[in-house]
Every structure is written in structure tokens, then in C-alpha cells.
Amino acid sequence: MTILKKIKNNLFLIIVVFVYLAIFIMKPTLGIDSVKGSAYYLKEMLMIMPVIFVLTALLDLWVPKEKIMQFLGKDSKAKGALLSFVIGSVSAGPIYAAFPMCVMLLHKGASIRNIIIILSSWSVIKIPMLINEFKFLGAEFMIIRWVLTIIAILIFSWITDRIVKTKDLPKDKLLTKGLSINKNACIGCGICANTYPQAFEMQGQKAVLVESDPSSLDKDKIEEAVDACPVNAIEYQE
């Protein structure tokens, strides 16, 4: 049963390994190039993601939930959309760096519409991208593409907000007497397991709760782990 559980927790990784093996068997040269490309992106992630985790944790600590709801929540309207465009456009790094921050913003009350705007603008209208677009393709192309892209983002963010509700987002949690981990939000950083190994451990790329007597848990240690989680994936209620 333990082996099956480990396979289930690492199913995606196992599939990727088999795909690489198949590529190596059929086209060894392509397999080598694929491994080199994956190694490059893995190195990039290892350099970028720790910084993103720290920045996300600092934003979570410094920016109160009320401010997030005021400027990025459902009632923020035009100012929320504008701020979301600014956040996405001035942010640095690849798009995967945006996900931990967006999870944190959702947890603190940002609307789905504004999260879509942040992710979309992060992907296609970042300022460095516009500068290079202007340089190589000209001002007219850049301006028309930029305006049409913004219109498209606004339309699709509005549609998504109407279809997807916050309550519909994954909330797969392991519960133990008021202590919970949102496995879909967990990014596998391992901070909670390092902070309080008696309550948390890593299984694959996710944190899980250690089976123990709830009455034996140290409340201060749990709260320390909750505060340390960069994406607020841990919740504790007495």
C-alpha cells in the first residue's frame, strides 16, 4: 500500500521519466537535447523560486488581508483591474514565478478576475517584452498588439470570473482536529517540515500531516509553521 501511495504521489514524475526513456530509445539525439533543455529550466527554477518564496512570504506578512480585498478584491472594480495590469506588467521572471504569489493573493481575498489579469499580463505584456517588441517590430505593431491584448485579457478575465467561483477552486485538505494542509496550494518548499517535523513531513513534492495525537501538538510550533508557509497552505483553528 505504501508503494502504491508513493507511486500515486509521484505519478507525474514517473510519467515524465518514461517519456524521456521512450525518446532516448527512439531518438537518442533528441533525448539528449531534451535532457539539456530540462536541466537548463530546472537550474533556472532553482535560482528563481527561492527568491519568489521569500518575496511572497514578505508580501503576505506586510500586506494585510483588508488591503488586498480593497485593491484587488471583488469590489475593487476598475482600480483593481488597473493595479492587476501594473503588477503583471512590471513583474520580472518567468510565468511560473507568478503562481505562488497568486495563490497567496487569492487566499487573502483577491478576485479571480484580477488574478487572471495578473497572470495574463505577466505572460504577454511585460514592459521588457514591449521594449523588445518596439525595437524589432516597430511602434505601430507594438501599440496595436498591446491594445488588442489588453481588450482580450479584460474579456476573458470577465468570462472566467463568471464561470469559475472561489468556492469551485480545489480545496483538497487533510484534516486533523483543526489542522489542515491545502495540497493543491502546497508548493513543496518543505518549510513546515523543517519548522515542525513532529507535525509535518514531505511525501513526494507535497507536505502532509504526521499521524499523531492532536493533543500532543505544540500550538506555538504549529502557528510558527503556519506563519512560515509562503503560500498560506496551512490552516489551524483551535
Image (cartoon, helix red, strand yellow):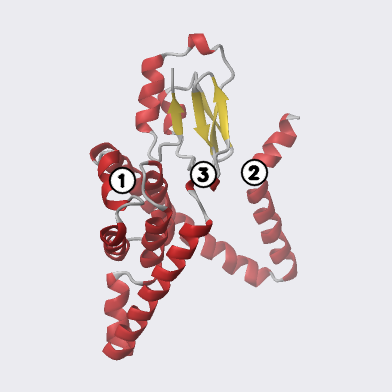
Tell me the distance, in whole angstroms, between the alpha carbons under discs 1 and 3. Answer: 16 Å
Q: Is residue 54 left or right of residue 155?
A: left
Label 1 with label 3: CB-CB less than 8 Å: no
Q: Which residue is mark 2?
A: 10
Q: Is residue 229 left or right of residue 202?
A: left
Q: Quadrant of the N terminus?
A: top right
Query: Please, which residue is most extreme toward the top here?
Result: 215
Q: Give above or below for 214 relative to 152.
A: above
Instruction: Residue 118 in the image: state x and y as whole percent.
Output: 36, 60
Q: Give above or below for 162 relative to 225.
A: below
Tell me the distance, in whole angstroms, between the alpha carbons under discs 2 and 1. Answer: 36 Å
Q: Secondary structure at mark 3?
A: helix
Label 3 with label 2: CB-CB less than 8 Å: no
Q: Quadrant of the C terminus?
A: top left
In the rendered structure, which amino acid carries the disc numbered 2? Asn
Q: Give above or below for 73 relative to 213.
A: below
* Mark 3, other Cα within 10 Å: few <14 / some 14–19 / many ≥20: few
Tell me the distance, in whole angstroms, between the alpha carbons under discs 3 and 2. Answer: 27 Å
Label 2 with label 1: CB-CB less than 8 Å: no
> Which residue is found at the position 52% from the left and 13% from the top?
214
Q: Is residue 114 left or right of residue 210?
A: left
Instruction: Residue 179 in the image: state x and y as whole percent.
Output: 49, 23
In the rendered structure, which amino acid carries the disc numbered 1? Met
Question: In the depicted view, which residue is nearer to us: 147 or 221?
Answer: 147
- The mark nearer the N terminus, 3 or 2, is 2
Q: Secondary structure at mark 2?
A: loop
Q: Which residue is mark 3?
A: 167
Question: In the depicted view, which residue is nearer to us: 111 or 119?
Answer: 111
Q: Secondary structure at mark 1?
A: helix
